[in-house]
Each structure stands twice: as C-alpha cells, then as structure tokens.
Amino acid sequence: MAMSKSLIIVESPTKARTLGRFLGEDFQIEASMGHIRDLPKSKIGVEVEKNFEPTYIIPTDKRKTVEHLKDLTAKAANIILATDPDREGEAIAWHLSEIIREQKKDGKDFQRIVFHEITKEAVEQALTSPRSIDQALVDAQQARRVLDRLVGYKLSPILWFKVKKGLSAGRVQSVAVRLIVDREREIDVFKPVEYWSIDALFKKGKDEFEAALTEKDGKKLSINNQKDAAEVVKGLEGAEYKVNNVTQKELKKSSYPPFTTSTLTQTAANRLRFTSKKTMKLAQDLYEEGLITYHRTDSVNLAQIALTQTRKYVEKNIGKEYLPDKARIFKTTSKSAQEAHEAIRPTQADKVPDSLKNDLDRDHLRLYELIWQRMVASQMREAIYDQIALDIKGNAYTFRANGAMIKFAGWLKIYGREEGDQLDERFVPLLKIGDSVDLKALRPNQHFTEPPPRYTEASLIKALEEKGIGRPSTYAPIISTIQDRNYVELLERKFKPTPLGTAVTDFLVKNFAQEVDYQFTAEMEDKLDQVAEGKEKWQEMIRAFWQPFEKHLEVVAEKAARVKVEAETVDEMCPEGHQLVIRYGRFGKFLACEKFPDHKFTKTFEEKVDALCPESGDPVVIKRTKRGRPFFGCSGYPKCKWMSWTKPETTPPVDEVTAPAAEA
C-alpha cells in the first residue's frame, strides 16, 4: 500500500465493499471481522483486586487478521476507525487502536469517524469531522462485559452445585426468564369467570348490521350465566326496536413513528413471523449494504434530509393530498436514547422495494419493505374515519351499534393496519332518532375470562423495554440465550418455561432476590447509561455491585438448600418397563428413560395440541425437524401426511336464537 493512502478499518467485509463503492483510490478499506480481542473463555479474565482490570486476549481465529492489520497500519499514512456508532462499535475501535498502536508512535494518527448510514454523503461528511475515541462509551461496554462475566462465572458454579451440573446464569437473561416464569404462574392460578354477551342482527331496508346489548333501564348490564341470558331473551319478546340516540363524528388516526430496534423486532415478529435474531441479522445486512440507517437505536428522531426526501417522494408518487402541511416530528420517549441519534429508515426514500427485487432475497426484501413503508407512512396525512354509533332500544334494553368506515386512507394507503388495531371497521347505516329497525336474530354467546397470554418474542421485548431491562443491542441475544440454555421453549410462537427454567428461577428468586429484581436490573442499566455519558466511573459502579454480591455468594454457597428439577413424565413406558420422561437436548424435547444414563432408550416426543387435522380429523401434534424447528403434523402419520408450520384453526359453531315471530 502506498504511503499516501489512508487505511479505513470497519467490522465486516460487506461494510468494506459498500464503502469501497464510493470512496476513491486514496483509501484502502479492511475488515476486522468483528471484535479482535475478548475476555478468555477458560477463566474469568477480570482482576478483581486490581480495580476490576479486564484481561483481554486475541482469540486464535483472529490472530491472522490482527497480524494483517498490523502490517497495514505500519505502512499507512493515516488510520481511520469506522466501526458502528454505538458502545459495541466504539469498543471495537478502541481494541483496534490498542492492538495496532505499537505500529505508530504518534497516537494522533488514529482517527475515529462515525456515521449512521453507509452512503457517500454521510461517509464524506464523517471524514471531514473525525474525532478521538469516546472513552465513556468504551467504558460502558467494558462495564457491561465485566459485570456479566463476574455474575456468570461466580453464580454459575453455585447453580451447578445447588440445581444441576452444567448450568449457566446471566444477569439480564435470568430476569427475562423470571418474566416468563411469573407469567406462567399467573396462568396456572387463574380462575376463569363465566359471562355472556348478547348480539343482535338488525335490518333497515336492505342494510343489515350488528349491535351489542349494553344496558337495561339505562344501567350497564352484566350477564353472568345462561339463566341470565335466557331471561334477557325472554324480556325482549315482542319488543319494537327504535333508534334512541345517534352519534356521528370524524376520527383522525395518525401514523406510527419510524422504527426503533424494539418496534422493528416486534413488528417483524407480528407481520413477518421473524425471530428477533433473524430480524437483527437481516437488518445488519441491509445496513452494511447501505440500504438502511443503523439498526440498533431507541430514537425516533429523523435527519432533515430524510424528511425532505420522504416528503418529495410522497408528493410526487403518492399524491399531494397525502402530504401534510409540514414534516411530522416524533419525540423520543426512551430516556436512554443517546447512542444512535436517528430512527431506522431507508437511506433513500425513493429507493422503492420493487427496485431491489433483483438485488435482495425474499426475506431481506420483506424487511426492507417494512422499514420503507413505515418511514414513508410516518410522513403522510392522518387516516380519516367516519364513525357512527347507534343506540337501539327494545323494551327496557339498549343495544349499541358501532361503525367506522375509512373516509380518507392517508398513511394506511402505504402501511396498512397493525395486528391488534382496536379500531373495528364495520358498516352501520346512518339512521335518525325514532327510526324503527327489524330484528333478524339474537345471538347469546357464552364467554369465560381468559388468563394473561404467554409472552411472544414481540411482547417479551416490549415488556423488557417497558421495564428498562436491556438495551437495543441486547434484546435478540437475550432471547436466543434463554432458549439455547433450555430455560424456556417456544410453543405456538409463545414462551413457556421448562421445569429447568422454573427451578433455576425459583432458586435465584429465593437466594438472589435483588439480582433478579426487575427494578434493580433496570437501575443497573441506568448506571451503565451514566457511565456512557461520562457521569460515573465504571470501576466504581462495578465495585458498588460486587462487594455485597461477593459476600452474598459465600452465604448462599454455604447455606442454600439444593433444588430438585422435577422431570415431566408422559403416559408411556420404555421397552424395559420404566417411566419415560421429557428431556431437553440441542434440538428441543425428546423422550428418555427415567433410568438414564443406565438405560439409554430415547424416543421422539410428539406433543398434542388443541386442534384437529383438516384432512383426517385426527388430533394434531407438534413434531420437530432434524434441526429442532417445531411444526404441526397429523398424529395419524404415515397414513395421513398433512403438515403445516401454523396451527390449524377450528371455529366452534355459534348458537343463534331466532327472532320472535312477532318481529318477523
């Protein structure tokens, strides 16, 4: 490399290639392949007595890369570190500078540049304003790494001794498992309560519409059982139904802000059925290809150039009537949003998804389309609904019919409605007070109150964010880790704790109540943020946690009772007549003899679900691929070979009470 060239070091070859498209021959761009130093795996790697000094090593698989970078830096006239714009990226830049500094006597030769999108304009702007490494961000990353290493390496041996050999504990992961265990306990103790609703089908001219019974004699009506429902139906015999009240209004619904890491992973889970791990991997690829801005962020801020480009696109390609008078500015509510200063958005508003069909595979394109739609929709006018509410009285009873019809699609034209949107679009005719309507049918419906739902990936990330646990870069690793350790399992896309996860959680809650407390964990995150902002020294923060924790470890190791993990049994025996139990392996559940390891009999585990095969009518079971991915299959296999990734839906018949003859 000629002396006149500047060396730019980034994390990945993809990012290097993207930069190479628009930087000239004055630059040589190389990839570090992620972190080049780390704590050792074989020991704790933290000198507690030396102010918690970390002992970093160069992993074996990174030694060639490091030597190559050293050779290049020895020849380079200028060294530019262009790693990602967050704590992790800052730490990688710091490790690079530490490793290769010996090749340069003058530390000023190291420059740090930061950009939130890999575009020609953003990178050229960054090159004009280099800075030094932000030591506060590095310290925050080191503090998290050291804190998690201390907890993991000191707590795991206690779990080995008190619960089960081979276990490992994580500071934030343990709290995430506790959320799932606590929710399962709520479900277990939940007592369903019966209640009934009565819907009516009315007709006026050619129009038919539905209404729900809400009041009797002007007071809210509760129907607790079938007897009460029958009395209501009887009380409506011979009734004449007239409109008692009409409410008509216009409702405006604003668009959502552009994505943060949390909302992107949640929406991708709901709309695209992507895991958080998959979403983040795809987003990383899109970012490194220069298609989206940095994807680890909890900010909804938007750059002025992005607002201008998006508004131009809306006006030119969607229609001026869809463009608000001025740009929509969203306020970031997360108090920790300080690392990445912009939301996730396309780097070019006019780069429509269709234009990338030949460049991206299906999943990358679907995620890009979601991000593009969300950004464009965020700068469009509100959707406008015409809302009509009719109160219809019959004898002493009042029914309410609510209707909402789109008057102007606004941002919904691009983005559509979210799953779980509460606004119910249905037709209700605009009638007048005193108008008579005909009753076609009454439908008494039995219901039972339902327990809180198990967490999905989306709702778990939302809960972690709401409680202040974890940060954008940690959500996907948390979810992957608790599954890899067999503390939780996914059933129909919902998390259920395993017996092992429950046992470990109970042990930690009993013996380390503070460390797995939601509020305490959130406060630790806040302290890490304080370190990142330069308001607190990381060693002092670690020491305040470590000193009482170390003493507590000794007490628990000596006095805590052992915990037995109760194995789940099935109604089946092994060939030698012993009970089969459910065990967890690398690829999920399997059946094994209770006498393991003396008896090594194993069998595939098939779990029944509340559904029938749409082809044979036999019960549906959960099966697993060779790599452990669950799918639904017919229990009658191989006679019936039906299978699906999604559970078949069964809709129970609806009982209808025919309208009394007097109303026909």
Image (spheres, grey):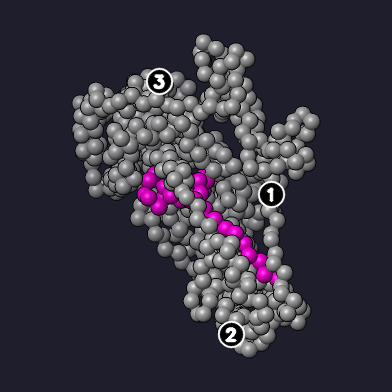
Q: Nearer the viewer, residue 305 or 59?
A: 59
Q: Nearer the viewer, residue 468 or 81?
A: 468
* C-alpha separation, residue under disc 3 versus residue under disc 2: 70 Å
| Disc sitting over residue 244 in the figure | 2
The secondary structure type at the circle numbered 1 is loop
The answer to whether 193 appears left or right of 534 in the picture is right
- Tell how many labels: 3
The residue positioned 40% from the left and 52% from the top of the image is 466
The answer to whether 85 appears left or right of 653 in the picture is left
What is the x, y in percent for residue 395? 60, 81
Label 1 sits on residue? 650
Residue 528 sits in quarter: top left
Q: Is residue 264 above or below residue 223?
A: above
Contact, mark 2 vs mark 1 (Cβ under 8 Å): no
Q: Quadrant of the C terminus?
A: bottom right
* C-alpha separation, residue under disc 1 versus residue under disc 3: 43 Å
Magenta residues, start to end: 441-470
Contact, mark 3 vs mark 2 (Cβ under 8 Å): no
Residue 436 sits in quarter: bottom right
Q: Give the residue type that dot 1 points to.
A: Thr
Label 3 sits on residue? 165
Q: Give the residue type that dot 3 points to.
A: Lys
The residue positioned 56% from the left and 22% from the top of the image is 580
